[in-house]
Amino acid sequence: MSSGAFVKTAYAKQTGETLPKTGWKTLPNISNGLTVATELTNSEMLSGSRMAKAGMVTSASVQGDIETELMFGAYDELLAAAFWSEWSAGASPNTLSVGATKHQFAIAKDFSDINVNHVFTGCVVSSFGLTIDTSSLIKLKFGMTGLGYQESKTTSFAKTPTKTPDTAKASGLSIGEIKVDGTKLDVCVESFSFELDNQTEVQKCLGDNIYGGNILAMLANITGSMTIAYSQKAHEMITNQLTGVTLSLEIPINFGSNKYVIKIPKFQVTGEIPSPSGTDLVTVDLSYTVVDESPVIEKHTA
């Protein structure tokens, strides 16, 4: 029997189809949902009795979410993979925007107390989510899709992984001055979410392995939500849904003297007029869709 406390996750950049032998790093996480699933195609052949003939495995998929708490610098490789891009080089701030560069990883998932080891290969970040609220640490979710799987009951596939430093975390208290259209938003913001769906598709060809041969990213679908106190400013933001006018947003996440800044140049909003009871704090749930220009993450390092 196994304890969840002994599940270890590590990852390495992967080039081509070869399983990496070096470059492994531990991946701190809350949960690793990567798994393999197969599709069994039933035979339609008659057997002369009422019993069906054995089927055949004709397809398989590698998918799952890896959930983490945001730590400064710890997930920069995965953030770049989520945006299908590269961080800009040079002096701070380094920036990241949506691109077309695919990053592939091998991800090991080891149940170390029973020595059952899994590795998922050819993995890309198909979706990404960030959630912030007033009472929790800031959380990230990386939705992974892969093209291969192996298992071992003798040894881990992650060879001597380098330990990822346990850097500073952040919570709702770490949020700096939020700006809408370049002006400070003087309204209480209770929560914020950011969702990036790369709408990846696995391409399967005749003669490929059961997992497929390639993963392609389609149009980036970028959405999110904010819960804000109802006010004249909140009302003004919601009424923009009547005309489709775009707004801009800037949210800094501080880690002492370092920070990330999420910048959304253009987004459109939807929302409903609140219907509170007599004992409710009046808030409005505002949903947004990013359009025209890529969002940007800035990394400011002291």
Image: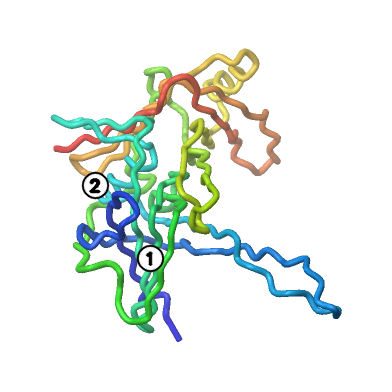
Most foreground residue, 17 or 235: 17
Query: Image height check: is 158 above or below 128?
Result: below
Amino acid bearing label 1: Val
Left or right: 46 with respect to 232?
Answer: right
Indicate the quadrant where residue 98 lies.
top left
Left or right: 172 with respect to 300?
Answer: right
Mark with earlier residue (1, 2):
2
> Is the N terminus in the top left, top right, bottom left or bottom right quadrant?
bottom left
Q: Is residue 278 visible?
A: yes
Most foreground residue, 7 or 170: 7
As helix, strand or loop, the secondary structure at mark 2 comes to: loop
| Position of residue 138 measured from the top left corner of the image (x, y, whole percent) | 39, 49
Identity of the residue drawn at 68% across and 63% down: 41
| Position of residue 245 measured from the top left corner of the image (x, y, whole percent) | 55, 14
Query: Image height check: is 20 above or below 156?
Result: above
Query: Image height check: is 169 above or below 253?
Result: below
Most foreground residue, 166 or 274: 166
Q: How is the image coloured?
A: rainbow
> Which of the labelled discs sits on residue 73, or is there none?
2
Identity of the residue drawn at 30% across and 69% down: 157
Classify 10 Å Cα crowding around label 2: few (below 14), some (14-19), many (20 and above): some
Indicate the quadrant where residue 107 lies.
bottom left
> Is the C terminus in the top left, top right, bottom left or bottom right quadrant?
top left
> Which of the labelled discs sits on residue 119, or is there none?
1
Identity of the residue drawn at 32% across and 33% down: 297
As helix, strand or loop, the secondary structure at mark 1 comes to: strand
